[in-house]
Amino acid sequence: MSSGNDDFEQRIKSDLRKIVADTSPELRARISAMASAAAREARRPASRFRVLVPLGGVAALAVIVVAAQMLRSPPGVIEKAPPISADDVALLLNVDNLDLLEQMEFYLWLDREPGVLDDAGVSAPEAPRRT
Amino acid sequence: MLRHVDGNTKTWHFLRAVESSRELESFLRSVGPRAFRIARLALRDDQDALDALQEAMIKLVSRYGSRSPEEWTPLFYAILRNCVRDQQRGRQSRGSILAWFIRLTNLGEREPGEPSVVDAVRPPLQELESEERLRKVLNAIADLPARQQEAFLLRNIEELDVRDTAIAMGCSEGSVKTHYSRAVHALREKLGDV
């Protein structure tokens, strides 16, 4: 930067200092009062209120969501769950044993057709044990 | 710096908080008048500038009061910048209604040669010549684009270095240098040899 620019900047800087120094006493007093008020915040211990307000908000939101769910479905009416397919079970259990998976499919079919067991005159088989 | 000597943690924390709050208060008192001038130039209104300053002080204490004092200055000016922006946005929405009203009633027509808003700044010195020069400087700075004005004032009023100015402005050091150099060039063209 050239010395001409430096002189110019120095002059402006000095002007700005004068402007700041010339801040009226009333204004300085207001700024000091603001500084004291802000600093008092640092002295204040962390209020429980600050933690409780967001927690209260979350709790209220949860209550609203639950209430909305209850209002949507009339009491006593439980939505019927969709039938479980063997694929879903396989996905859930991540079973590699194909024999076990086939048996599961068979028992699920048997469960859906209760009349088959009665016709055959046999009692329900025990659930296969996982090894 | 206080030391934890008596084993009473609560007392130590209390004393630390008191000491920290004293340091913060002293910092805010010293930075306040300079910060007010910077906010005043951007907002061109005493009350708006004081509001922005108060908000920035409270935010610094509540969010960054636990940081080391060396970090306070750039952080404070970064917060003040946002507070000034908020004030400007608020004023814009208020102003659009007011402007509509002024247009409707033809109250806002300014005569040629009528002083601008910055002219309403309290005369800084008794000497008329010097007073006139300072007013010219203030008007020229107030007319700079916002980023150039920020860079110029942070470097010259607060005397921040390039690194801290970049933190306060939320930009790179290269951008600070560019904004600053453009500001000096524009002021030199406008003011000549003041």
Image (spheres, rainbow, N blue to C red):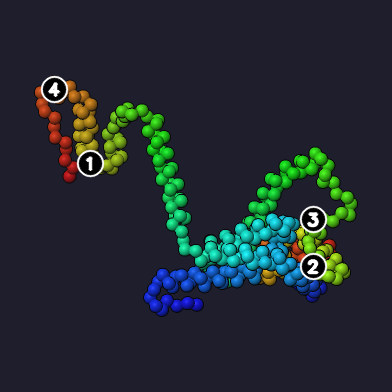
Image quadrant in which you'd find residue A65: top left
Q: Which residue is denoted by mark 1 in the rendering?
A: A97
**Viewer-nearest of discs 1 and 4:** 4
Q: Position of residue B171 (x, y in %)?
A: 63, 60
Please report whichever mark, 3 or 2, sits nearer to the chain's N-terminal start.
3
Circle 2 marks a residue in which chain?
B
Image position of B38 with respect to B15: above or below: above
Which residue corresponds to the image point at 70% horizontal and 57% vertical from the top-left?
B47
Mark 3: which secondary structure? helix
Decide if residue B141 is in sight here.
yes
The disc label shown at residue B124, or none: 2
**Viewer-nearest of discs 3 and 4:** 3
Asked if disc 3 and disc 4 are in contact, CB closer than 8 Å, the reply is no
- State the separation of the CA atoms marked 1 and 4: 30 Å
Decide if residue A9 is in sight here.
no
Q: Quadrant location of the N terminus of chain A?
A: bottom right
Q: Which residue is denoted by mark 3 in the rendering?
A: B117
Q: Which residue is denoted by mark 4 in the rendering?
A: A118
